[in-house]
Image (cartoon, rainbow, N blue to C red):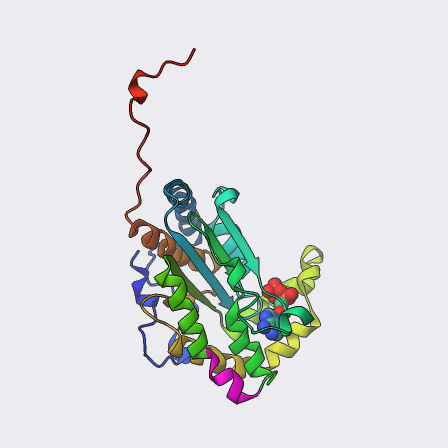
Amino acid sequence: MDVDRYRVRPGVSVNLAEFDPNEKTLFDGGKDEGKTAIKTLNLRLEALQELLYAENRHKMLIVLQGMDTSGKDGVIRHVFDGVNPQGVKVAGFKVPTPLELAHDYLWRVHPHTPGRGEIVIFNRSHYEDVLVVRVHGLVSKEVWERRYDHITAFEKLLADEGTTILKFFLHISKEEQKQRLQARLDTPDKQWKFSTGDLAERKLWDDYMAAYEAVLSRTSTDYAPWYIVPSDRKWYRNLVISHAIINSLEGLQMRYPEAEAGLETVVID
Ligand code: ADP
């Protein structure tokens, strides 16, 4: 699956209205086939992650962003199903604490970036500081406007120091969000996920889309590309992301470390 079609070319001005959140161009089958395909990909990812860990050379950072209900948690659950938890970490970024707010906005982010042999998934990220912060005017325009440059510089630093960065925008339609919020309301086991605050954010949908367009247009680079992932179909979203990660890991040409010399003569008593 050549998911490169979803990669945002550096410098291109993105208009999200041109991207259909419901398409499934790269997959002929339907939901059932899609779910089966994911299982095979899970095994490939498991093997690649083990290799990354064993080689202990590369680092991978995966950034997940999207509106409420877009499926950030679902991606973590399904795309990484079966992967050894020892080599993968998830860092979630919520409303900053007073201590975090007393520092620059990247202060809380940097310690969570991956070390050698690690994959780290950001569930939300430093991009909140040009998304929710911009939409709600939590800092002045002058302050958020210069952050795009900070962010690309920060990611360049990580990339220069050996981090492979992949960023996914989970693109859902406003109608799909309505249905997912309604499902949370109607299902007792999902009600804990429902927050009336989500409805306030939903009212700001157009402002969020404008803020996402700025992010996608200004911060997709060769060293840290954004992918706009059609996400109205959960299984297709998982397939696209899974392929993007696997393609990227395969491109690293990893190898298991050399075994110790003379192992063929070793006898275990
Ligand atoms: P989830 O990620 O599952 O939606 P929450 O419902 O706790 O988790 O949402 C986290 C909230 O924290 C989001 O509304 C997000 O916009 C907010 N948030 C994250 N980073 C920041 C930030 N830097 N400034 C303000 N709010 C933030």
Which residue ends up furthest to the top in the rendered image? 269
Q: Quadrant of residue 227?
A: bottom left
Segment tinted magenta in the rendering: 140-147
- Residue 97 appearing in the image: no
The percent coordinates of residue 266 (x first, y second) are 34, 17
Q: Residue, x 61% and y 81% (percent of image)? A: 203
Instruction: Locate residue 40, reporting x and y percent.
Output: 39, 43
Regarding ligand 1, which quadrant of the image does it lie in?
A: bottom right
Residue 77 located within the stretch drawn in magenta: no
Say above or below: 214 vs 70. Answer: below
Q: Is residue 266 visible?
A: yes
Quick one: quadrant of the C terminus? Answer: top left
The main secondary structure of the magenta stretch is: helix
> Which residue is nearer to you in this view: 80 or 258?
258
Q: Quadrant of residue 54?
A: top left
Total marks shown come to 0
Q: In the rendering, at what x and y percent does residue 222 appear? A: 31, 68
Residue 66 % position (x, y): 51, 69
In percent of the image, x 52 and y 44: which residue is there? 85
Residue at x-position 52% and y-position 51% = 89
Asked if residue 259 is positioned above or below residue 102 in the image, the reply reads: above
Residue at 36% over, 54% down: 243
Which of 120 and 9 lies nearest the eye of the viewer? 120
In which quadrant will I find the N terminus?
bottom left
Above or below residue 193? Residue 177 is: below
